[in-house]
Amino acid sequence: MSTASAHSKIFILDFGSQYTQVIARRIRECQVYSEIVRFDIPAAEVAAARPNGIVLSGGPSSVYEDDAPQIDPEIFSLGIPVLGICYGMQLIAQHLGGRVEYSARREYGPSMLHIAPGSRLFEGIGEQLDIWNSHGDKVSELPPAFRAAAHTENSPYAAIEEPAKHLYGLQFHPEVAHTPRGKEIIQNFVYGICHCAMDWTMGSFIDDACARVRRQVGEEKVVLGLSGGVDSSVVAALLHKAIGDQLTCIFVNNGLLREREEEMVQRVFGANFHIKLKYVDASERFLSKLRGITDPEQKRKLIGNEFIDVFQHATAELLEEDRAAGVEGHSYRFLAQGTLYPDVIESVAIGGNPAHVIKSHHNVGGLPEKMHFELVEPVRQLFKDEVRDAGLQLGLPKEIVYRQPFPGPGLAVRILGEVTDERLRILREADTIVVSEMKASDWYYRVWQSFAVLLPVRSVGVMGDQRTYENTIAIRVVESQDGMTADWVRLPYELLARISTRVINEVKGVNRVCYDISSKPPSTIEWE
Ligand code: XMP
């Protein structure tokens, strides 16, 4: 397992609930490390990893279906406290001699929980609690030795427990915001029942991560493709702390960056952080390859392939430079990546064989396979907001830590049609106005993304006494949790008006501004 065993930790067995990651987040908010593992993890593996407690997540199946995901029942005999949530509670009931039935009255949404006195899980909570349900099945008969710790109008067994064996079950979801005091239940479980210490702090994570990286790479050298985005920036700062000059960052200017992006990255990482930074200006090369190309997929592919070539060439140059400077020895064996926890959690396909799906990290896709690097992924245990915390602790400026996402292919996917110098100029100037107005009005950090798109459309306008026939800029501002779904932001009209006026007045070649009011799905966030 990936964490130092001295730390407290909770395992979450994932039975496919949409809330599994939320449970993990809630436990980490208690400053206790949590790790999502597959639902069919063998009991022996759990015993060897010695978590302080186990949470069984909810899931979409019914425990009595033939292909329902099952737990290794030996886990209930390890003496490790278990908290089953929804489907997890039904598993406890089913395996330990109770009964689970289809419920005629499906409970979905809010309800009131009535708590029996004396349960450690509900300590300090009182007699009643607002809760959030989302279940069809329910426990109709308790397993022997269990008792009801709480009930609702519809279910006599909304919470069950066998305290002597440290087994607990909740029919509702304590991890969601609609169960307002759910966090206290989770705290009671992790501190009161599992006796976890509050030892998962960003400071301790950074120390552990540095130690792990040093163990992994020894004296060898590491390269990192620095994009200036949050993840690779945090990895750069972390690795610099861990291994200093053994790290070299390569920053590729592909000619598709935002205004003064390359200056900012060089200032923050080179001048302030004193990180070894190789700046490669490959803009000519990218832009000449892009000439005449209008198909979105072709653009993306071309940029991706070109990046790999440039990166490869840059690492070869680094080696040459080292040799010329008389630096002995090692080649660049390791490639660091800003892979995050949601990218590595194996998703569970319920209803058939569980799929070992690992989402690919598209930022530097293809690099490791083509170049035979070994990967260093020091933040692969972290959620995005934890990466931001780490960045702040490592001294990165807020402008980097709270940056909005920016696609790898850069402005090329925001220029519909051909990418030319002139069209890049127009988009860059318009984008700079959007970002500066979003920042000035305090909206920038409240949204997921806010940017300009240059459309392949010209329209008629009038400026002064002149008829114009110029370009159209679309403004895209969305809110989102993870980029998978998104909605357009209802920005104040005054702000939209200011952006529009400034873009039309200040950006030569634009006479019309539109606001994109499509959600994802069915639209995507980027236009290409
Ligand atoms: P879409 O447009 O698919 O975007 O709704 C979802 C999120 O992903 C970002 N995005 C990318 N990020 N390389 C990246 O690193 C890419 O090729 C890429 N394409 C889209 C997009 O900005 C949004 O946040």
Image (cartoon, helix red, strand yellow):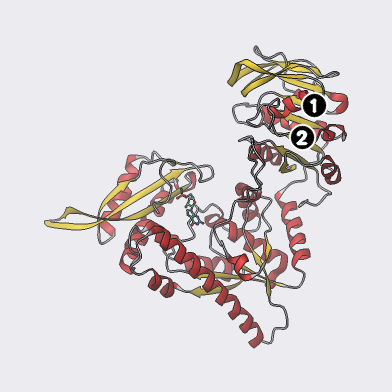
Residue type, mark 2 in image: Ile
Ligand 1 contact, mark 2 (Cβ < 8 Å): no
Residue at mark 1: 95
- Neighbor class of circle 1 (other Cα within 10 Å; few <14, some 14-19, many 20+) is some
Using residue 467 as the reference point, say whether residue 117 is left or right of it. right
- Neighbor class of circle 2 (other Cα within 10 Å; few <14, some 14-19, many 20+) is many
Q: Which residue sits at x=45%, y=49%?
A: 449
Q: Which numbered tag is attached to residue 71?
A: 2
Q: Residue furthest left?
A: 465
The percent coordinates of residue 114 (x first, y second) are: 70, 15
Above or below: residue 38 compared with residue 278: above
Above or below: residue 440 compared with residue 220: above
Are the residues tagged 2 and 1 within 8 Å (C-beta)? yes
Q: Residue furthest top?
A: 153
Helix, strand or loop at label 2? It is loop
The percent coordinates of residue 35 (x first, y second) are: 72, 44
Ligand 1 contact, mark 1 (Cβ < 8 Å): no
